[in-house]
Image (cartoon, helix red, strand yellow):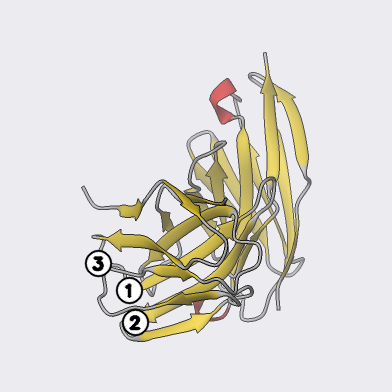
């Protein structure tokens, strides 16, 4: 079955560390997205990519970085520059001419 | 840019009908989509309106008025499992949903 896989499900980061969240999809979707969700809040766009080797900043890109070397993969790195990284991170994908996003099951990141 | 307004909470009883409203401002509007998210889970796509009018999918319907920058999600024959957060997401330039807003938390009571 096609879908999006995010790993790990839970991640703990020490102060000053960089961590990378994985997102892989086998839906053959062109576009991929990273969102951040804080408790009781909506989703805010961090980065998105519409084609391989190209990506754009969303509303809250500071302290994050991404790469899109393969169509299937869109990893997100939370750098030490992100001052408040504890949140639920969701990866999504969609066909470029489509409108429905498919989401992964999310990664819950906690700074310890 | 984008802005969204949804009620923060709605409470209804099993079997009832509930309407969740959404007003938006976005550039390059392509349509309005709706998602459901249970606590701790990922959002799942419910419906999409590109044109004015009502779209029906089983117990769920969604309505759009582009001239009013307004839409709503209608849930009929409410069930306990419908207790979740519901987000509207306007698709803007490039068919991108830049924000899903804070969502509406629906509590279905017996």
Question: Any mark on residue B86, and which?
Answer: none
Question: Are the numbered discs 1 and 3 placed on the same chain, yes or no?
Answer: yes
Name the residue located 37 percent from the left edge and 50 percent from the top edge.
Answer: A8
Question: Any mark on residue A28, and which?
Answer: 3
Chain of the residue under label 3: A
Q: Secondary structure at mark 2?
A: strand
Name the residue located 77 percent from the left edge and 44 percent from the top edge.
Answer: B8
* Residue contact between numbered discs 1 and 2, judged by CB atoms under 8 Å: yes
Crowding near pointer 2: few (<14 within 10 Å), some, many (20+)?
some
Name the residue located 75 percent from the left edge and 29 percent from the top edge.
Answer: B11
The residue pinned by badge 1 equals A30
Q: Earlier in the sequence, mark 3 or mark 2?
A: 3
Residue B60 appears in which quarter of the rendering? top right
Give above or below for B106 relative to A50. Answer: above
Crowding near pointer 3: few (<14 within 10 Å), some, many (20+)?
few
Q: Earlier in the sequence, mark 1 or mark 2?
A: 1
Regarding residue B48, the answer to whether it shows in the image is: yes
Image coordinates of residue A5 in percent, x first then y, are: 32, 53
Question: Are the numbered discs 1 and 2 placed on the same chain, yes or no?
Answer: yes
Chain of the residue under label 2: A
Which is more toward the observer, A5 or B89?
A5
Image coordinates of residue B50 in percent, x first then y, are: 54, 65
Q: Is residue A17 left or right of residue A74?
A: right
Crowding near pointer 1: few (<14 within 10 Å), some, many (20+)?
some
Name the residue located 57 percent from the left edge and 30 percent from the top edge.
Answer: B82
Image coordinates of residue A27 in percent, x first then y, are: 26, 60
* Residue contact between numbered discs 3 and 2, judged by CB atoms under 8 Å: no
Q: Secondary structure at mark 1?
A: loop
Chain of the residue under label 1: A
The residue pinned by badge 2 equals A51
């Amino acid at each position: 079955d096609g879908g999006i896989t995010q790993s790990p499900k839970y991640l703990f980061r020490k102060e000053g560390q960089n961590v990378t969240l994985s997102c892989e999809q086998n839906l053959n979707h062109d576009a991929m997205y990273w969102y951040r969700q804080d408790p009781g809040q909506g989703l805010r766009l961090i980065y998105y990519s519409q084609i391989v080797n190209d990506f754009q900043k969303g509303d809250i890109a500071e302290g994050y970085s991404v790469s899109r070397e393969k169509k299937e993969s869109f990893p997100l790195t939370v750098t030490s520059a992100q001052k408040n990284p504890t949140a639920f991170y969701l990866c999504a994908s969609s066909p470029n001419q489509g409108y429905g996003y498919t989401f992964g099951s999310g990664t819950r990141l906690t700074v310890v | 840019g984008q802005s969204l307004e949804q009620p923060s909470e709605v409470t209804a009883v099993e079997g009832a009908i509930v309407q969740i409203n959404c007003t938006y401002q976005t550039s390059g509007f392509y349509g309005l989509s709706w998602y459901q998210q249970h606590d701790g889970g990922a959002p799942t796509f419910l419906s999409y309106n590109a044109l004015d009018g009502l779209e029906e999918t089983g117990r769920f319907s969604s309505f759009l008025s582009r001239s009013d920058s307004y839409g709503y999600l209608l849930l009929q024959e409410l069930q306990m499992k419908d207790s979740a957060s519901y987000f509207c997401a306007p698709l803007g330039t490039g068919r991108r949903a830049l924000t899903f807003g804070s969502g509406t938390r629906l509590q279905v009571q017996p």
